[in-house]
Image (cartoon, rainbow, N blue to C red):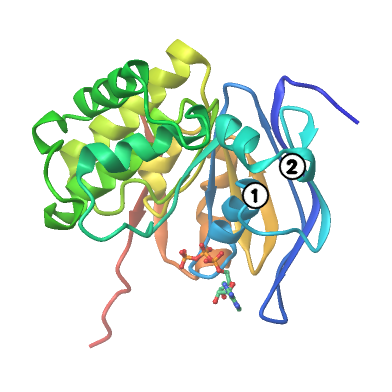
Amino acid sequence: MTGRTDVAVEVTGLGVTLGGARILSGVDVSVAAGEWVTVIGPNGAGKSTLLRAVGGLLPASTGTISLFGTPITRLRRRDRARVVATVAQSPVVPAGMAVLDYVLLGRTPYIPPLGRESAADLAVAYDVLDRLDLTGFAARALSTLSGGERQRVFLARALAQGASLLLLDEPTSALDIGHQQEVLELVDQLRADHGLTVLATMHDLSVAGEYADRMVLMAAGEVVADGPPRAVLTDELLAVHYRARVRVIDGEHGPLVVPVRARRSG
Ligand SMILES: Nc1ncnc2c1ncn2[C@@H]1O[C@H](COP(=O)(O)OP(=O)(O)OP(=O)(O)O)[C@@H](O)[C@H]1O
């Protein structure tokens, strides 16, 4: 059955089992078209697993996942790739591949079987390289780039895919503060200009809160809070689920989470 297309992601009662272990249980997450939702939670909470399931990279044991109203199980791989693009935490990179060729992999869903990329595909690849400040790297082997440069190339490949839903798993973890802002602002600009929908995971809670419309807090494979940043980034919720001592202060674009060191005795 085809449902509403103004809902980009509808996850209902999702359970995922991996290696015999239950990793996600009863997860409900909904992302409206054009919305930016960031999933947070401590290490091992199940954030990447959720993104991989939404990207069609892992099967659901229970529950359903729909993208723009179509159950993911009904989308063929090629059609799915035109709808959703994923930037994984550590993508596998083919040995010796040049940056431009890697970004062109994003155009695969548009290239006929046994065909070659068109001039239009090349133009898209060069455009995203330019937007991400990567033009000078086009001919370089991906393996020779720094961690941050490589992370921008992974994003470039996802953007070249032209999908309307972007899944970003820790997209800025290797980036310096300047490139972090550049990448997040670019994604936000694309969202404003092209109605892109973003479902991300991030560990930097202050940055996460500045960009997300809504945040989903996960712990031990379940959703424990879901709401605007101010409702999710609270001293209490972070203390309980991260076992962290933090102070949340009001920032211009959202709450800022400041770690507070324990008082030393003696
Ligand atoms: N193939 C697998 N077999 C068994 N357990 C797995 C498998 N893949 C992931 N897990 C476990 O599932 C749990 C959730 O992992 P996941 O990577 O989704 O967490 P995460 O919230 O993204 O964590 P992090 O913040 O550390 O990246 C972890 O405990 C992990 O060890």
Q: Which residue is mark 2?
A: 72
Quadrant in the rendering for residue 240: bottom right
Residue at image location 76% in from the left, 58% down from the top: 60
Closer-to-camera residue (246/10):
10
Residue at image location 29% in from the left, 18% down from the top: 123
**179 displayed left or right of 20:** left
Quadrant in the rendering for residue 91: bottom left
Quadrant of ligand 1: it is bottom right
Q: Quadrant of the N terminus?
A: top right
Residue at image location 16% in from the left, 37% down from the top: 178
54 lies above or below 250: below
| Mark pair 2, 1: CA separation | 7 Å
Q: Would you say residue 223 is visible in this rendering?
A: yes
Q: Earlier in the sequence, mark 2 or mark 1?
A: 1
Quadrant in the rendering for residue 30: top right
Which amino acid type is marked by label 1? Gly
Q: Which residue is mark 1?
A: 56
Please rate how many residues cluster around mark 1, counting C-alpha atoms within 10 Å: few if below 14, some from 14 to 19, many from 20.
many
**266 displayed left or right of 119:** left
- The answer as to whether callout 1 falls within 8 Å of ligand 1 is no
Image coordinates of residue 19 in percent, x first then y, are: 66, 80
Which amino acid type is marked by label 2? Ile
**242 displayed left or right of 149:** right
Q: Mark 2–mark 1 contact, CB under 8 Å? A: yes
Which element carries disc 2, helix, strand or loop? helix
Which element carries disc 1, helix, strand or loop? loop
Closer-to-camera residue (233/88):
88
Q: How many circles with numbers are drawn on the protein?
A: 2
Please rate how many residues cluster around mark 2, counting C-alpha atoms within 10 Å: few if below 14, some from 14 to 19, many from 20.
many
